[in-house]
């Protein structure tokens, strides 16, 4: 029995020894067979020529593939590498087929080239020829970017190896307008973990960063963190030339957690978080805007002519959080929808969460109670007659400011020093209060002037809470038509805040800061309406170095503001929207131009209907005034160079009046 066991064991050992000898003897042929199958599979799937110059075993389980290239038909070479070292699984050898396990790739070069409409990589994004085409909608037009992005995601994930160690991996993109070079001294993918150092040069901009993350190709999951390798941070390329902006950050975390493509719509979910974000764009703010920490949990759908940020999306800026819904469709009409609903946030946290550099006057404010913001915006860009714009900042009953920050908003309740700026430079500083001989208390200003200004600029000043929603909607329509800040929809409250606390620069930040300050003043009753109107009448510009009602009355008519008659009051009201063009209202003899009569009839008629003037005063109202003082010297004694088309001036004048209730 013992001998039989020994003989059986010896036979088994001999069998395996023979098997290993045969595998060792024929493994090179098995390797050649495997390489030929890989080449055939790639070339059958794509219009390319794949070349592997040499494949050989170096050791029992190690394989070296040398001089590999991938060349699309009639195109530039897409990929080359000097060598690939691979580990072969013993089990695969025993099964008679070779499966590469761990790969080490040295000196790889991926080169994407675009010449006109021709590229050497677009075949990767095309549909599989074996996939039957779906019926096409003949009414649809344009490219489905959801479908394109879905192919790009699937192509990228389908080609991620399980384990690979790249040494000196390089990628580049070259076209007539773009040159991008990416260098990675190493890229390690091991059991779903990713790590690399990356140097990216986009034209003249160079970014250095460390990348670390995880990937699961089967479920289309990826999470990656980008860390700046130097103090300059990571700067986004091309935003300067495209948007006249600069965007930089220290750290960026990105993740894709889910992807679904159904009915020609791609929906992706994930998260993005950025640290120390810096944005500079002249139309946003005049200086760098800094966000310490921002985060978004996103759900985005892209389909034919449709782009949607789902209402499940949550945005966080520092400590402030909000749910956001945004949608844009470009067929059959171009429609934009935006909804924002913030969480309730403690007052001090709200102001601390505002990005620094965006709202200088609000920085450092401390408050009790909570705030909550809601926005509903809708516009059809192809039919601008109707715009939905509802913006509400709600506060708890106990909300109050306990400490002002950079600026004490309540300073306008007493005398204060005010500086006027022109093109960002101070041109005049004066006291707004009794110490200034040109200061006029509200009761010393003619009722004609007060009522004419209220009629033309803000008829509901004493009844609204600082905002004229219909005027703002009309301003949005006007600005969209003009493609610029053509009209502001400002109430007197907003004009006061703009003049006292803000610069004259037309930026998004300035407009938002203006709205927040107005809300604080009006909703917290920080300043009375009479005091606001009094300050307004004493600081607004009325001509060349002319500020305030008393200065204007003397400059044009040589009298006190209490002595102004109806015609003089309406003239002064008419030039508030554009005081630097005051001379265009007169001919060389100092007479009002004929087109002013329409403005006089409009303002006078409204004042009559509101009971602000009598029928007799209206009937005796003529568009004529007599100039005295410095204004007469400047207008009458100089050549008439202020000829302006009447239609242009008349349109400007009427658009400057917020009389949308009449």
Image (cartoon, grey):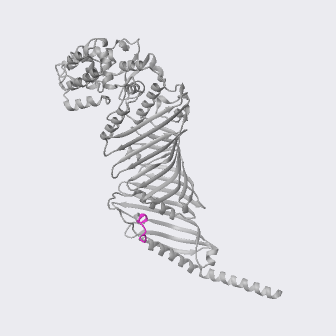
Q: Looking at the picture, how far across and down is residue 7, in whole percent?
A: 77, 87
The reply, left or right, for residue 10 in relation to residue 301 is right
Residue at image x 33%, y 58%?
141
Residue at image x 35%, y 13%?
438
Q: Nearer the viewer, residue 58 or 471?
A: 471
Q: Looking at the picture, how far across and down is residue 221, in whole percent?
A: 54, 57
- The correct choice, above or below, for 258 with respect to 382 in the image is below
Tell me, yes or no, whether the highlighted magenta stretch contains residue 127. Answer: yes
Main secondary structure found in the magenta portion: loop
Residue 166 shows in the view: no
The reply, left or right, for residue 417 in relation to residue 400 is left
Q: Residue furthest right?
A: 2
Image quarter of residue 413: top left
Quadrant where the C terminus lies? Answer: top left
Q: Looking at the picture, how far across and down is residue 490, in whole percent?
A: 36, 29
Residue 609 shows in the view: yes
- The correct choice, above or below, for 390 with respect to 214 in the image is above
Region in magenta = 123-131
- The correct choice, above or below, for 536 with respect to 128 in the image is above
Tell me, yes or no, whether the highlighted magenta stretch contains residue 1. Answer: no
Image quarter of residue 639: top left
The reply, left or right, for residue 117 in relation to residue 593 is right
């Amino acid at each position: 029995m013992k001998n039989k066991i020994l003989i059986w064991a010896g036979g088994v050992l001999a069998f395996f020894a023979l098997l290993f000898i045969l595998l060792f003897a024929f493994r090179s042929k098995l390797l050649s067979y495997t390489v030929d199958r890989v080449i055939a599979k790639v070339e059958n799937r794509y219009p390319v020529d794949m070349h592997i110059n040499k494949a050989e075993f170096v050791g029992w389980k190690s394989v070296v593939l040398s001089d590999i290239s991938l060349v699309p038909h009639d195109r530039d070479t897409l990929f080359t590498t000097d060598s690939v070292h691979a580990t072969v699984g013993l089990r695969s050898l025993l099964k008679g087929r070779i499966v590469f396990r761990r790969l080490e790739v040295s000196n790889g070069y991926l080169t994407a080239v675009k010449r006109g409409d021709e590229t050497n990589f677009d075949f990767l994004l095309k549909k599989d020829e074996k996939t039957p085409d779906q019926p096409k909608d003949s009414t649809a037009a344009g490219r489905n970017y959801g479908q394109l992005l879905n192919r790009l995601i699937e192509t990228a994930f389908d080609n991620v190896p399980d384990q690979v160690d790249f040494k000196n991996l390089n990628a580049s993109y070259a076209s007539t307008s773009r040159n991008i070079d990416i260098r990675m001294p190493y890229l390690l993918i091991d059991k779903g973990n990713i790590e690399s150092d990356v140097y990216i040069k986009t034209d003249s901009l160079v970014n250095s960063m460390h990348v670390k993350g995880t990937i699961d190709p089967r479920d289309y999951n990826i999470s990656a963190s980008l860390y700046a390798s130097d103090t300059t941070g990571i700067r986004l390329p091309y935003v300067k030339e495209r948007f006249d902006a600069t965007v930089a950050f220290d750290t960026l975390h990105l993740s894709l957690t889910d992807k679904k493509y159904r009915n020609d719509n791609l929906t992706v979910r994930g998260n993005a978080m950025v640290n120390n974000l810096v944005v500079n764009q002249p139309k946003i703010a005049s200086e760098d805007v800094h966000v310490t920490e921002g985060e978004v949990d996103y759900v985005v759908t892209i389909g034919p002519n449709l782009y949607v940020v789902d209402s499940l999306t949550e945005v966080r800026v520092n400590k402030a959080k909000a749910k956001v819904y945004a949608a844009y469709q470009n067929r059959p009409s171009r429609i934009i929808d935006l909804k924002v609903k913030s969480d309730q946030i403690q007052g001090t946290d709200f102001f601390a969460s505002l990005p620094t550099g965006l709202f200088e006057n609000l920085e450092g404010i401390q408050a009790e109670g909570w705030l909550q913001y809601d926005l509903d915006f809708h516009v059809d860009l192809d039919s601008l007659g109707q715009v939905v714009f509802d913006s509400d900042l709600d506060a708890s009953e106990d909300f109050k400011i306990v400490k002002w920050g950079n600026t004490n908003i309540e300073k306008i309740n007493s005398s204060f020093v005010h500086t006027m700026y022109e093109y960002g430079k101070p041109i005049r500083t004066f006291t707004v209060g009794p110490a200034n001989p040109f200061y006029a208390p509200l009761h010393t200003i003619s009722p004609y002037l007060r009522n004419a200004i209220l009629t033309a600029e803000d008829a509901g000043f004493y009844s609204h809470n600082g905002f004229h929603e219909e005027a703002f909607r009309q301003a949005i329509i006007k600005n969209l038509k003009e493609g610029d800040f053509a009209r502001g929809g400002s109430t007197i409250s907003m004009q006061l805040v703009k003049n006292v606390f803000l610069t004259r620069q037309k930026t998004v930040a300035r407009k938002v800061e203006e709205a927040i300050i107005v809300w604080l003043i009006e909703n917290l009753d920080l300043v009375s309406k009479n005091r606001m109107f009094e300050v307004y009448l004493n600081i607004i510009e009325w001509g060349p170095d002319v500020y305030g009602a008393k200065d204007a009355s003397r400059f044009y008519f040589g009298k006190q503001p209490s002595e102004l008659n109806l015609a003089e009051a309406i003239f002064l009201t008419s030039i508030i929207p554009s005081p630097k063009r005051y001379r265009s209202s007169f001919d060389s003899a100092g007479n009002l131009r004929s087109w002013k009569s329409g403005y006089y009839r409009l303002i006078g008629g409204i004042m009559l209907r509101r009971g602000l003037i009598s029928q007799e005063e209206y009937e005796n109202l003529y568009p004529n005034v007599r100039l005295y003082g410095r204004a007469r010297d400047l207008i009458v004694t100089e050549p008439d160079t202020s000829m302006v088309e009447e239609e242009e001036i008349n349109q400007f004048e009427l658009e400057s009046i917020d009389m949308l209730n009449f």
